[in-house]
Image (spheres, rainbow, N blue to C red):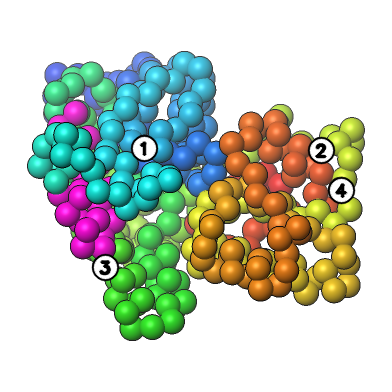
Amino acid sequence: MTAEAIETGPRTGSDTSAAAADGRPLRIALLTYKGNPFCGGQGVYVRHLGRELARLGHSVEVIGAQPYPVLDEGVPLTELPSLDLYRQPDPFRTPKRGEYRDWIDAAEVATMWTGGFPEPLTFSLRARRHLAARRGQFDVIHDNQTLGYGLLADLGAPLVTTIHHPITVDRQLELDAAGSRRRRASVRRWYAFTRMQKRVARRLPSVLTVSGSSKQEIVDHLGVRQDRIHVVHIGADTDLWSPDPSVAEVPGRIVTTSSADVPLKGLVHLVEALAKLRTENPQAHLVVVGKRAEDGPVAQAIERYGLQDAVRFVKGISDAELVDLVRSAEVACVPSLYEGFSLPAAEA
């Protein structure tokens, strides 16, 4: 916990300054508005951070929305459900009347109907209400890049947030890739929540980030003061991520991780490179850890270059299976156009 969070956090009967200063274990609420457990940095980060904080002796409770993270033993999950509007197989669904619980649900649907992405805001409002009802139960609240208006309220404990990188970078890359005025308007509407995140970030007493480059991007894009940003690098578990000669290397195998078919992740460029590579090395093939998109630039590129048998997607695999998959590769590739900190690169 950083000094700024302690000094500017609300004063309650829980004596949070003493909890941080005298070495006693902290009671930590770890917030994540989206926690995909198998791909995507947020779910992986929350799982590993929660586990390691618990190993240090702290009491960690993850409070999250769908898709819920899968957590290690000793780290409980409190579900704070959204309407899960983007779930498969019916993304952008309209909920039935009986699913609405309150005005936050109505706001979530209305934002989706008008082309926006509501989850950072609506999760923060639900989290504010949940934490207010549990005042005094936590010593610190750690937000994982929600950056919603609800977090600006008195939450009953000091707040620190992790910003992996500004989502404004994603927004600009999607705008650059947009092929029409209509598509650019759609991208701007979808990323309208980044205006909120910029306002919230500037008002936070303390921000954690994962690399020096991310720190500079947060300063440049979000306007957060440098002295409020603290770099805490992400680590790879070298007991797990280590060479094993008993795992055979598969000729021509390339492995990558991709959480979404979006310009930021650069997967379409890797597929195009694979097509060229196979003219010289027909054994070359790609294994993608992530969900196959039925449509979109990646799916179109796979079909255009006739790579249906050369690109395989896997999801829901265990840590041990993922490690062995990377061990079996000749090349591990991170095709992203931008990353705040590439954990897959460090692990590989």
Residue 245 at x, y = what percent?
A: 89, 36
**Precedes in sequence: disc 4 or disc 3:** 3
Regarding mark 1 in the picture, which secondary structure is present there? loop
Which of marks 1 and 4 precedes in the sequence?
Answer: 1
Residue contact between numbered discs 2 and 3, judged by CB atoms under 8 Å = no
Circle 3 sits on which residue?
Answer: 189
| Residue depicted at 27% across the width and 24% down the height | 139
Which residue is at 74% across, 44% downward?
326
Amino acid on which the number 3 mark rests in the picture: Arg
Which x, y percent locates residue 246?
89, 33
Q: Earlier in the sequence, mark 1 or mark 2?
A: 1
Instruction: Point out residue 202 in the picture as x, y percentages from the top left corner.
Output: 24, 57
Q: What's the residue type where badge 1 is placed?
A: Gln
Q: Which residues are magenta?
A: 107-130
Q: Which residue is mark 1?
A: 66
**Residue 61 vertical placement versus 249 (above, below):** above
Mark 1 and mark 2 in contact? Answer it, CB < 8 Å: no
Q: Badge 4 is on which residue?
A: 250
Q: Which residue is mark 2?
A: 243
Camera-side mark, 2 or 4: 4
Specify which label sits upstream in the sequence, 1 or 3.
Answer: 1
CA separation in Å, label 2 and label 4: 15 Å
Q: Does residue 286 lie above or below 27 as drawn?
A: below
